[in-house]
Amino acid sequence: AQTVTQSQPEMSVQEAETVTLSCTYDTSENNYYLFWYKQPPSRQMILVIRQEAYKQQNATENRFSVNFQKAAKSFSLKISDSQLGDTAMYFCALSNDYKLSFGAGTTVTVRA
Amino acid sequence: NAGVTQTPKFQVLKTGQSMTLQCAQDMNHNSMYWYRQDPGMGLRLIYYSASEGTTDKGEVPNGYNVSRLNKREFSLRLESAAPSQTSVYFCASSTQGVGSPLHFGNGTRLTVT
């Protein structure tokens, strides 16, 4: 069984500031993939970033970057230069086959 | 390019009624999924179809049935709706491969009274 835990239900950040979302997971597999998805108020699920566990280099995608600590089973997401359009719920997800297991989500509000 | 299309967007049912949620993808993906989203619980997998002709139970399959009609279409049926099935339902698809990201539809908000 695999589990994903997001311990921060809600976070608030000032526009242009940086916010970091935490995610921890548990899996017995050595080869797996981690994801962050964004769900804005429109309800659409949007892939933000993907990390392959066997790659030590942290993934980045424009203003979004991750801190992947394999030994600690931690996968945090950093949003730099926050924008109003970043307001959304963010889900961490884990996959070691073709199914994804999701965390409970963190609601991020960017304040003007 | 439509991606993953779900119908309907909203639905209200009475307890005991049945309905089918429809999903179609035009990305030639092999795998398709049905998730439900509930507050504080993230997305939970109901059923999935790894490839055309196969379906398997996910984490919360009770009360649901699925049909993989062809490579494009994957439907979810509620035979006798219950208030506990009030949720937002998402269909998703992916290429069949470990670590493939999921592409989601826009969701169906279902209320069972």
Image (spheres, coloured by chain):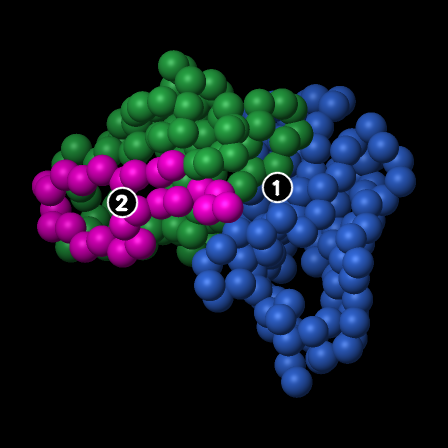
Chain colours: A blue, B green
Residue A8 lies, in percent from the top left, at: 62, 59
Q: Secondary structure at mark 1?
A: strand
**Is any part of residue A34 visible from this angle?**
yes
Residue at the image point whose x is 48% and y is 66% from the top: A41
Q: Which residues are magenta?
A: B1-24
Residue B69 lies, in percent from the top left, at: 31, 23
Question: What is the quadrant of residue B4 in the picture?
Answer: top left
The amino acid type, in three-letter code, at marker 1 is Ala
The amino acid type, in three-letter code, at marker 2 is Gln
Q: Viewed as shown, does residue B82 lie left or right of B65?
A: left
Q: Are marks 2 and 1 in contact (CB under 8 Å)?
A: no
Residue A64 vertical position relative to residue A67 in the rendered view, above or below: below
**Residue B13: within the magenta?**
yes
Residue B1 lies, in percent from the top left, at: 50, 46
Residue at the image point whose x is 75% and y is 63% from the top: A79
Mark 2 belongs to chain: B
Question: What is the quadrant of residue A30 in the picture?
Answer: top right
Q: Quadrant of the C terminus of chain B?
A: bottom left
**Residue B3: within the magenta?**
yes
Q: Secondary structure at mark 2?
A: helix
Most foreground residue, B107 or A57:
B107
- The residue tagged 2 is B85
- Label 2 crowd bin: few (<14), some (14–19), many (20+), radius 10 Å: some
- The residue tagged 1 is A93
